[in-house]
């Protein structure tokens, strides 16, 4: 279609690139007439018109632009047809067994990855954009020689289009999430990211250098102290300066999509495997981190949990994992909600009680005992328990809950009750679990551990 | 809610930061009037359960011990807390690791208070924890010699108070070596030798050979030492002289020892001593003369003919391990002794 449109303009300009024989004949006849009768046209003398050898340069330029536009659009059409042919071959069924067909399909798929077919496909819109730009330039120049008023209109509209295109390239390059992506912006995205990092690094170095110079030469008294500092009754050595503190904002940004993704899958997807995976993640993602606007599909998770048990409260065979992970999600959501406030946590009531786990399933039994605890102190007691039969992943996850629970309930916990209930054990504890327990103990002892400690969580 | 960034906890030193946070929490809580005072033993018992506790735990535990010893009136159950802290810090460590790079133990005057509490508990493992804390060395700290010095009374009677596990024995041996003979002068010769006879130290038990060499040579400087030191330790002295860790110039030659041994006709001990002398003070070193050594050696061989073979065996091992030549004069004496023995046989 685009070729047809540009052809109309090409035909018009094409006629101007060759000398017009009629015009030449008329000039010669005019010269003959004036030679024969000099008074035929008053004020004119007989002059033989020069032979026109080449068209005007602006006509040549316009013709070049328009023909280039036409050829590029035709080339785009050609590649599009070839691409369709290539994709037809990919879709063609070669026959044979399912394994053979899968193997053939995989080989073709690998070939698509190895040979850059996507470059050809992505070049089509780019070629059409170039063709359109050339056509617009040609038209502008052509019209400039005919009528400047019309030319101004064309130039203004072309400029507006070019400016718009440039703007969407910049927007697409600066943000990966921007929907106005073009092939050019996607190409520029990588180099721009590197450049931005380098600029940020340079700015940071400048700031560090300025700070060092300032602290050394101007305010030496403000330099960090490295001598021992008193800590209550203990003399402790101050640790070295903070080295490369991890950027909490980066961690939060990485985690930002987790909650909406998991929430969307649980609400909209019916595929059991996807649902199980999402429920599993629901017990790990950091709900309410960006505020309390995105509410978790708590009701659906509770329903899933209840559906895993029969009327007598025993878990159906084959649904153990779903019961365990939905139970984890429920406990996790409730704990994180409590971190926000007790009032907000009231929106997530505990699930019905009376469920039992098989005797051999210590993780699920432990989870149920925590969930069914009526008070914060007894829940804390259960969270502190570690049995030798528990899996390490369960212990690690429980220690995360323990940390959040003790932080969230520090003002209402009855430690006397907890102390009476608590029973240590002999089970050895891995370091990762112990670090969380130690922070929980700090909170229990009255230390003011900040909320960011709880928020921080490295992605595996 | 406070949203201040606790950047410290996000660094690579997360463990150290958390331990610091825990120390800061425990210090005020151990006071009996603190409303969560009762949680402290629970916390400490929980920490004991951590498998393979890294070195910062020992540093934290030792610092807390200092704090508890300083304000001992404030605490109800100071003894059990101290024993728990020592367990957290040192129970999991290998007793043979006397040098640990990652440690930085700050010995304070308040740690003296640990000595009475721990030794009176009669808990052998707790005593071993304390001895480990006091004897361990590293690039950033030395053993707590002053505090070890006040352990001597307890160490002298330890065999009657607590059963000697292999761990405790190893740490007691190291402690005795570090304290030295002069440190034990106050406890009395009899108690010292009782302790030594119970310990039965051999060259395989000693981490720091230099300290024990000095210890034994200092004992031999006293007449009681020559008399009471058991044969086991004379042989131990020979083994130390053979070992490649022997340091020259550790002591000067004392001719009085030979005289004393000859007077009491302690030929087995003289045999060990002559072996040591030939290895450490060959003729011309430390004021020894070839004539004296030759005379005493021949006397020994005359009284104790079996000493020839043992002396040859020791000197060959010494030559091999220390890469030194057996003195020519000694070889000559061996030859004479062999000839005399053959004549006697004929």
Image (cartoon, rainbow, N blue to C red):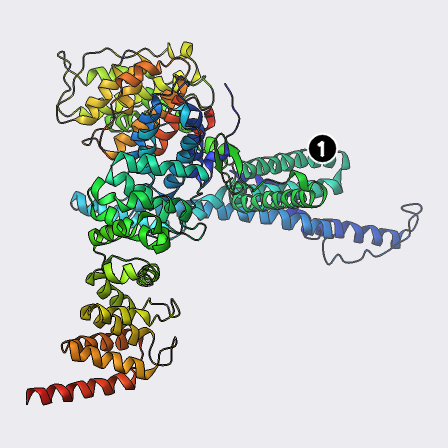
Q: Residue furthest front?
A: B263
Give B177 or A104, whichever is nearer the viewer: B177
Q: How many marks?
A: 1
Locate residue A346, reporting x and y percent: 37, 9
Locate residue A181, reporting x and y percent: 51, 36
Is residue B178 something one can see in this rendering? yes
Name the residue located 17 percent from the left edge and 24 percent from the top edge: A319
Locate residue A197, reporting x and y percent: 56, 44
User: From the viewer's perspective, is residue B63 above or below residue B344?
Assistant: above
Q: Residue furthest left?
A: B346
Locate residue A75, reporting x and y percent: 49, 48
Q: Is residue A431 left or right of residue A319?
A: right
**Picture quarter containing residue A280?**
top left
Give A449 or B259, whichever is nearer the viewer: B259
Name the residue located 41 percent from the left edge and 38 percent from the top edge: B111
Q: Which residue is mark 1?
A: A153
Is residue A432 something one can see in this rendering? no
Q: On the rendered image, what quadrant is the C terminus of chain B found in?
A: bottom left
Q: Secondary structure at mark 1?
A: helix
**Picture quarter containing residue B75?**
top left
User: From the viewer's perspective, is residue A179 above or below residue A304?
Assistant: below
Q: Is residue A283 left or right of residue A145?
A: left
Q: Which chain is disc 1 placed on?
A: A
Q: Is residue B101 left or right of residue A154?
A: left
Pointer 1 local density, CA inside 10 Å: few below 14, some 14–19, many at least 20 = few
Give A32 or B22, whichever is nearer the viewer: B22
Q: Is residue A54 left or right of residue B109?
A: right
Name the residue located 36 percent from the left edge and 44 percent from the top edge: B133
Give A165 or A316, whichever is nearer the viewer: A316
Name the residue located 42 percent from the left edge and 34 percent from the top edge: B18
């Amino acid at each position: 279609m685009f070729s047809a449109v540009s052809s109309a303009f090409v035909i018009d300009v094409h006629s101007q690139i060759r000398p017009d024989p009629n015009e030449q004949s008329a000039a010669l006849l005019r010269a003959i007439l004036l030679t024969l009768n000099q008074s035929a046209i008053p004020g004119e003398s007989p002059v033989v018109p020069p032979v026109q050898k080449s068209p005007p340069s602006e006509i040549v330029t316009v013709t070049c632009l328009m023909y280039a536009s036409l050829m590029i659009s035709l080339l785009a059409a050609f590649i599009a047809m070839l691409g369709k042919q290539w994709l037809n071959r990919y879709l063609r069924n070669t026959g044979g067994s399912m394994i053979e067909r899968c193997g053939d399909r995989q080989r073709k798929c690998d070939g698509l990855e190895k040979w850059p077919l996507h470059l050809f496909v992505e070049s089509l819109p780019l070629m059409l954009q170039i063709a359109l730009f050339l056509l617009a330039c040609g038209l502008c120049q052509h019209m400039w020689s005919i009528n400047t008023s019309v030319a101004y209109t064309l130039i203004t509209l072309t400029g507006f289009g070019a400016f718009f295109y440039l703007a969407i390239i910049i927007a697409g390059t600066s943000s990966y999430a921007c929907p106005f992506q073009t092939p050019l912006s996607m190409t520029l995205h990588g180099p721009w990211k590197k450049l931005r990092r380098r600029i940020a690094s340079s700015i940071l170095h400048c700031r560090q250098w300025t700070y060092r110079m300032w602290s050394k030469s101007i305010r030496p008294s403000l330099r960090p102290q490295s001598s021992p500092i008193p800590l209550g009754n203990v003399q402790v050595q101050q640790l070295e300066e903070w080295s490369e503190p991890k950027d909490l904002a980066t961690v939060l940004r990485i985690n930002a999509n987790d909650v909406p993704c998991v929430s969307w899958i649980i609400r909209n997807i019916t595929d059991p495997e996807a649902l199980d995976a999402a429920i599993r993640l629901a017990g790990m993602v950091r709900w309410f981190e960006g505020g309390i606007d995105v509410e978790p599909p708590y009701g659906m998770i509770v329903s899933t949990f209840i559906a895993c048990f029969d009327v007598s409260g025993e878990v159906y065979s084959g649904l153990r994992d779903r019961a365990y992970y939905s139970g984890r999600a429920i406990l996790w959501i409730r704990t994180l909600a409590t971190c926000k406030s007790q009032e907000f946590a009231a929106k997530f009531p505990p699930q019905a009680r009376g469920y039992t786990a098989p005797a051999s399933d210590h993780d699920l039994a432990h989870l149920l005992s925590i969930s069914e605890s009526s008070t914060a102190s007894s829940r804390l007691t259960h969270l502190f328990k570690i049995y030798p039969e528990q899996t390490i992943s369960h212990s690690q996850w429980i220690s995360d809950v323990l940390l959040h629970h003790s932080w969230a309930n520090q003002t209402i916990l009855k430690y006397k009750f907890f102390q009476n209930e608590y029973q240590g054990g002999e089970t050895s504890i891995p370091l990762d679990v112990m670090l969380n327990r130690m922070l929980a103990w700090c909170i229990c002892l009255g230390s003011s551990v900040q909320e960011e400690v709880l928020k921080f969580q490295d992605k595996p | 809610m406070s949203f201040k960034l606790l950047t410290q906890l996000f660094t690579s030193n997360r463990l150290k930061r958390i331990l610091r946070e825990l120390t800061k929490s425990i210090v005020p809580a151990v006071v009996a009037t603190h409303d969560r005072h009762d949680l402290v033993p629970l916390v400490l018992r929980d920490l004991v359960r951590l498998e393979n506790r890294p070195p910062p735990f020992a540093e934290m535990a030792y610092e807390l011990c200092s704090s508890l010893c300083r304000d001992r009136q404030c605490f109800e159950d100071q003894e059990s807390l101290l024993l728990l802290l020592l367990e957290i810090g040192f129970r999991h460590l290998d007793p043979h690791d006397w040098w640990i790079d990652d440690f930085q133990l700050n010995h304070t005057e308040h740690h003296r208070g640990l000595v009475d509490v721990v030794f009176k508990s009669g808990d052998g493992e707790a005593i071993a924890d304390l001895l480990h804390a006091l004897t361990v060395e590293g690039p950033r700290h030395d053993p707590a010699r002053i505090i070890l010095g006040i352990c001597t009374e307890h160490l002298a009677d330890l065999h009657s108070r607590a059963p000697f596990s292999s761990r405790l024995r190893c740490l007691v041996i190291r402690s005795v070596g570090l304290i030295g003979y002069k440190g034990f002068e106050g406890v009395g010769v009899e108690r010292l030798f009782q302790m030594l006879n119970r310990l039965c130290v051999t060259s395989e038990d000693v981490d720091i050979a230099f300290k024990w060499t000095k210890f034994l040579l200092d004992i031999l400087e006293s007449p009681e030492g020559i008399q009471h030191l058991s044969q086991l330790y004379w042989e131990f002295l020979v083994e130390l002289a053979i070992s490649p860790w022997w340091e020259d110039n550790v002591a000067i030659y004392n001719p009085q020892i030979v005289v004393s041994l000859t007077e009491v006709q302690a030929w087995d001990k003289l045999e060990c001593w002559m072996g040591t002398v030939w290895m450490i003070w060959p003729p011309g070193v430390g004021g020894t003369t070839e004539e004296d050594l030759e005379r005493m050696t021949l006397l020994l061989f005359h009284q104790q003919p079996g000493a020839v073979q043992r002396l040859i065996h020791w000197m060959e091992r010494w030559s091999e391990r220390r890469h030194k030549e057996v003195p020519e004069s000694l070889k000559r004496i061996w030859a004479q002794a062999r000839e005399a023995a053959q004549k006697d046989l004929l």
